[in-house]
Image (cartoon, rainbow, N blue to C red):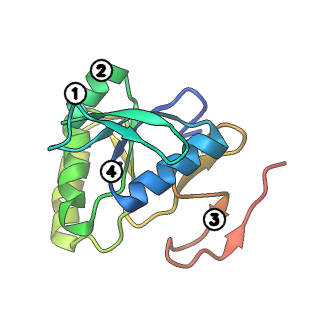
Amino acid sequence: MSILVNKDTKILVQGLTGKTGGFHTEQALAYYNTKMVGGVHPTKGGQTWTGSHGETLPIFASVAEGKERTGADATVIYVPPAGAADAIIEAIDAEIPFITCITEGIPVQDMVRVKARLDRSNSRLLGPNCPGVLTPKSARSASCRATSSRRATSASSRVRAP
């Protein structure tokens, strides 16, 4: 399997201003040196997100704007189920190569729409309902901390990097 994220991957955070998105972004910045380059929120574009340890990231009104301004090549989605499919499709339309979605409970019909869009794109989707991805000693996207499982909701085995 190829490496999906590494130390050079530039990641946008859809849902950065929410509790879950903010928490996991702080973790990724503090412990994994992940290149989180900005957040996306349709009504908060132009603002700046500040983490609890003083980290700051710009917020863009769209994924396309964020990609254009930062060169992002990945996005992680922390959006509630009702809006997650639209967030994934927005990332696909912006031609983000790698999309991670941790959201659980997205309606099946919404994911059918997502699958149809993915089939006509060059984007790859990890998820939804996944813990994310971690490349040991390199970068992290989403909420995974060296956890491997069959389901995101019941992590069953932990792995350590050598």
115 or 99, nearer to the observer: 99
The reply to whether callout 4 and callout 3 are in contact (CB within 8 Å) is no
Residue 111 appears at what percent x and percent y? Answer: 23, 63
Q: Amino acid at mark 4?
A: Thr
What residue is disc 3 on? Answer: 148
Element marked by disc 2: helix
Tell me which residue sits at (22%, 27%) in the image.
65
The answer for how far apart the CA atoms under marks 3 and 2 are is: 34 Å
- Rate crowding at label 1 as few (under 14), some (14 to 19) or many (20 or more) other CA atoms within 10 Å: some
Image quadrant assignment for residue 98: top left
Dot placed on the residue nearer the N-terminal end, 3 or 2: 2
- At label 2, which amino acid type do we have? Arg
Query: Which label's residue is closer to the chain start, 3 or 1?
Result: 1
Circle 4: element type: loop
Q: Is residue 24 above or below residue 61?
A: below
Residue position marked by numbered label 2 in the rendering: 69
The answer to whether the residue labelled 1 contacts the one labelled 2, judged by CB atoms less than 8 Å apart, is yes
Q: Position of residue 28 (x, y in %)?
A: 56, 46
Which label belongs to residue 17? 4
In the rendered image, the quadrant that contains the N terminus is top right
Work out whether mark 2 precedes mark 4 in sequence or the reverse, and give the earlier one: 4
